[in-house]
Image (cartoon, rainbow, N blue to C red):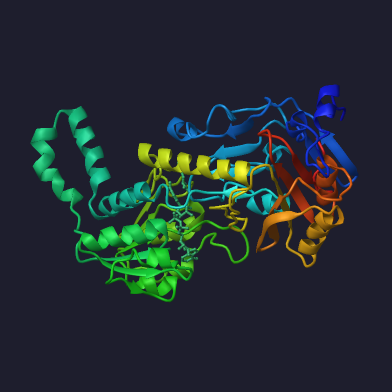
Amino acid sequence: MLFTTAAARLTRATITRRGFTSTSALNGVPTVHYDHFASGWNENDEPYTEGKFHIETFNKISPLGLARFPPANYEIAEDYPKNNAHAILLRSHKLQESEVDISVRAIARCGAGTNNVPVARMTQLGIPVFNTPGANANAVKELVLCGLFLGSRRLVDGINHMKKLGEEGLQKERVEKDKAMFGGREIAGKTLAIIGMGHIGAATAREASALGMETVGYDPGLSIESALKLPRQIQIMDSISSAVAKADYISLNIPYIKGEGGTHGIIGKEVISHFKDDAVLLNFARGELVDSEAMKEFLDRGDGRYISDFPDDLLWDHKNSILLPHLGASTEEAEETAAAMAADTIQSYLEHGTVQNSVNFPAAALPERQKGSIRITVVNKNVPGMLATISDVFARHKINIQQQINCSRGDVAYNVIDIDPVVEGAEEINLKDLQKELTMHEGVLSSRLIFGMAGAGYARNIDASHEPP
Ligand SMILES: NC(=O)c1ccc[n+]([C@@H]2O[C@H](COP(=O)([O-])OP(=O)(O)OC[C@H]3O[C@@H](n4cnc5c(N)ncnc54)[C@H](O)[C@@H]3O)[C@@H](O)[C@H]2O)c1
Ligand SMILES: O=C(O)CC[C@@H](O)C(=O)O
């Protein structure tokens, strides 16, 4: 792609013995994205709003959360022209790879579950995916508690019956006789099994215990933070089956993970065979965790109940199920907290390279960069020798590294490097060339220059399977 003359002039920021050549050159940190495809180094000079990050939103995101983005540096829109968005903010929208432009550096889910984002592919492309742990947990916990009551008393049937009687003008006449049809049981003294004792599960266990329930739990990845929130009396079990076998109520609070070793249909025939006949399953996690056929067989037997926050083609009209339209996190408070947390996370990644609350990147935070220094972040495949390769680029140009951090997680490694622009005895080096040299290494996925104008200086080493637009 062609540079405009102005853009070409702006990219001539150089590191010299004296540092940057002039103040205008400081502003000259690249204003375009550099994209290195299998075929070579291409440049993309889309018309960004100068100096602003573009945040693209999907779904309705709380305006109070969005207000965390200072308008001086950020612009927010539901749709940007191609290759104009720098970050994506979404809720339950099922994000397609084609919606992630080459300019996108980060994706944040205002919520807990990231199964609507192609996370594995984003990792291959060097793009961090963030979520907002715990931000909506109180809202979901409250609805799980509501689910306990919906499952123990025939409230929905009773409400519908009253409407019918009202239409017939028979309410007062029939109510006392008919109420026998809608009897229930109390939750105090009953046992609740919590599958997944994270933010929602642990809080639910605590409240259920306060309501007089016995609690048992299963979570092989229980964190210390969550363990500290559990009621003292909770009994920790070593399998889902042993937990559900004891339970009158079961609350499912685990992530949905597709594929081998994942959680698809984890509540299937085998686990359900351990349910008590009149067990109530509360699913406020994800519909796909439950095998609908097996659940239908269980409900058909007559005494069990299924309360879920998700649609189900087979169970939506079953007399023993109650399905809600994914309302768990739909409170003003949760929407605001989740959006604010996602906005803060995105800002601190875009402005400082800090990674927190990512589901595919390692946590990484370097102290604030020194005045005048340049921060460079590099995402690379987590294979041996990459740190040496990256450091070598700076060493070759006699560039002094002021501070740096290298962290890895699974297939990906992330570096944050602050360099000194004053390079004694070095030849002149153009920042753009430096970035190109770093980014075009086999194994480097992307790099950013965090310096100067918002929205500038991103490069992606796009693999052969991802065609340039
Ligand atoms: N209905 C809604 O609107 C709504 C809102 C928020 C979250 N959710 C769902 O609830 C899930 C849990 O949310 P959270 O905030 O508590 O997440 P969390 O990450 O705090 O807790 C999840 C817990 O599940 C455990 N876990 C994972 N796999 C497990 C398995 N196979 N068996 C037992 N435990 C397992 C983890 O170790 C972790 O402690 C989310 O992943 C999301 O899918 C739904
Ligand atoms: O955004 C929502 O309404 C739902 C969020 C919820 O499913 C989550 O996983 O946090």
* Residue 414 figure quarter: bottom right
**Image quadrant occupied by the C terminus:** top right
Q: Is residue 182 above or below residue 391?
A: above
Query: Count the marks: how many?
Result: 0
Q: Nearer the viewer, residue 224 or 216?
A: 224
* Residue 333 figure quarter: top left
Q: Is residue 243 above or below residue 284?
A: below
Residue at 82% across, 23% down: 6
Q: Is residue 446 above or below residue 297?
A: above
Q: Nearer the viewer, residue 395 or 281?
A: 395
Rendering coords of residue 395 (x, y %):
83, 57
Whether residue 156 sits left or right of residue 5 in the image: it is left
Q: Nearer the viewer, residue 158 or 35?
A: 35
**Image quadrant occupied by the N terminus:** top right
* Residue 152 figure quarter: bottom left
Rendering coords of residue 131 (x, y %):
52, 49
Q: Of all residues shown, which one is farthest toward the top?
A: 5
Residue at 60% across, 56% down: 364
Q: Nearer the viewer, residue 116 or 139?
A: 139
Residue at 78% across, 38% down: 20
Rendering coords of residue 53 (x, y %):
63, 32
Residue 341 visible in rendering: yes
Rendering coords of residue 427 (x, y %):
89, 47
Residue at 60% across, 49% down: 129
Residue 91 visible in rendering: no
Whether residue 331 sits left or right of residue 111 in the image: it is left
